[in-house]
Image: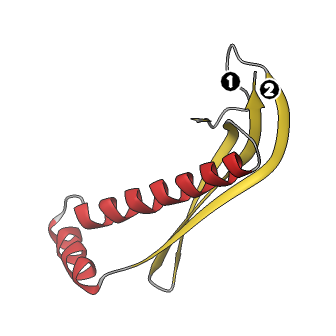
């Protein structure tokens, strides 16, 4: 399935619009990762644990969005937007776009 942030796919015509699709993922923060991330923040550098969690949440949200688009009869999602929020020590990633059929 083609998933793009652009409103169209170059060289392909959109033959049908199926509607807005959304996928969400909420991951709880692990206390041990929080401690190690804090140490990393103090001494500098990147927090691999948080980067890994963020990647997992993003992949889950995108996969859920693709599944919903497929269920609606689409073979692509255009205009994709990713949003990130932290809610009560939990990470939420939301992916939304428009399910379409490309010719």
Give the structural element (helix, strand or loop) at label 2.
Answer: strand
Give the structural element (helix, strand or loop) at label 1.
Answer: loop
**Other residues around mark 2 within 10 Å, as few (<14) / some (14–19) / many (≥20):** some
Residue located 53% across and 53% down the image: 63
Q: Quadrant of residue 33?
A: bottom left
- Front residue of this view, candidates 101 and 26: 101
Residue that lies at the very extreme toward the top in this rendered image: 11
Q: CA distance from mark 2 to mark 1?
A: 8 Å
**Other residues around mark 1 within 10 Å, as few (<14) / some (14–19) / many (≥20):** some
Measured along the vertical axis of the image, is residue 86 above or below residue 50? below
- Front residue of this view, candidates 68 and 45: 68
Q: Nearer the viewer, mark 2 or mark 1?
A: 2
The image shows residue 95 at horizontal and vertical percentages of 61, 55
Which numbered circle lies on residue 9?
Answer: 1
Residue located 26% across and 66% down the image: 49
The image shows residue 96 at horizontal and vertical percentages of 68, 53
The image shows residue 91 at horizontal and vertical percentages of 47, 73
Mark 2 in CB contact with mark 1 (< 8 angstroms): yes
Residue located 71% across and 51% down the image: 71
Counting residues from the start of the chain, the first of labels 2 and 1 encountered is 1
The image shows residue 39 at horizontal and vertical percentages of 17, 75
Q: Quadrant of residue 42?
A: bottom left
Residue located 71% across and 18% down the image: 12
Evaluate whether residue 51 shows in this view: yes
Q: Quadrant of residue 52?
A: bottom left
Q: How is the image coloured?
A: secondary structure
Evaluate whether residue 47 shows in this view: no
- Front residue of this view, candidates 51 and 15: 15
Which numbered circle lies on residue 14?
Answer: 2
Direction from residue 66 to residue 72 in the image, left or right? right
In what quadrant of the picture does the C terminus appear? top right
Direction from residue 52 to residue 78 in the image, left or right? right
């Amino acid at each position: 399935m083609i998933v793009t942030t652009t409103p169209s796919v170059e060289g392909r015509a959109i033959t049908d619009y199926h509607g807005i699709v959304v996928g969400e993922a909420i991951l709880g923060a692990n206390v041990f990762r929080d401690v190690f991330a804090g140490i990393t923040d103090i001494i500098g550098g990147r927090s691999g644990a948080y980067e890994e969690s963020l990647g997992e949440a993003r992949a889950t949200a995108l996969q859920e969005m693709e599944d919903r688009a497929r269920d609606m009869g689409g073979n692509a999602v255009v205009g994709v937007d990713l949003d990130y929020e932290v809610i009560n020590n939990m990470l939420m990633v939301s992916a939304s776009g428009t399910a379409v059929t490309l010719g």
